[in-house]
Image (tube, helix red, strand yellow):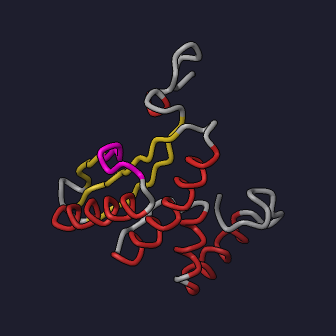
Amino acid sequence: RQPWPEDRTYWKFCHKGSCQDISFHTTWDKAPQFITAIGGAASKYGYPVAEVGFYLQPVERARACRLECDFYYNPDDLREVDRVRKLYADVAEILLNMGAFFTTPYGIIAELVYGGATEYAIALTKVKGLLDPNNIMSPGKLCF
């Protein structure tokens, strides 16, 4: 199976060439606050707020929602790459502090989530040790 045809540019890369996305779960009533905070962070880094992509999907029979934010950038422009990298890190911390629930934390988000939930990280490490006693799945990492 091929998730996307090889001869076509992946849809998220059509605008500028690449995309950094961040997704999390929240409740419907808090979604506007998260969107406003993301827009504020984008402005702080000089990223055009009008170019931030948002996707809102209901979950749990619309009791909650999955909110995705996309930052499009040109991967050949090193200044733009650095700006989006810094913006992403800042947004991740802002969202976590606002109560965003990251169901699949990886990269800097995993560091923030597990770093702030020591007992949870310890429990996950024990479970991983039971399921992977030879430490062959992502050696040296809790998850990804």
Along the line of sight, which residue is nearer the eye, 88 or 113? Answer: 88
Which residue is found at the position 49% from the left and 31% from the top?
13
| In this view, 51 is above or below 45 | above
Q: Residue 65 occupies which quadrant of the picture?
A: bottom left
State the count of labels: 0
| In this view, 118 is above or below 48 | below
Along the line of sight, which residue is nearer the eye, 121 or 85? Answer: 85
Q: Residue 70 location, x and y as percent? A: 41, 47
Q: Is residue 49 magenta?
A: yes
Q: Residue 55 location, x and y as percent? A: 30, 45
| In this view, 126 is above or below 110 | below
Residue furthest to the right: 134
Residue furthest to the bottom: 119
Q: Which residues are magenta?
A: 47-54
Which residue is found at the position 52% from the left and 22% from the top?
9
Q: Quadrant of the C terminus?
A: bottom right
Which residue is found at the position 67% from the left and 68% from the top?
142
Answer with left or right where residue 75 lies relative to residue 66: right
Q: Is residue 12 magenta?
A: no
Residue furthest to the top: 7
Q: Residue 127 occupies which quadrant of the picture?
A: bottom right
Q: Residue 104 location, x and y as percent? A: 50, 59
Q: Residue 97 occupies which quadrant of the picture?
A: bottom left
Q: Residue 54 location, x and y as percent? A: 31, 47
Answer with left or right where residue 85 lies relative to residue 65: right
Which residue is found at the position 74% from the left and 58% from the top?
138
Answer with left or right where residue 18 lies relative to residue 41: right
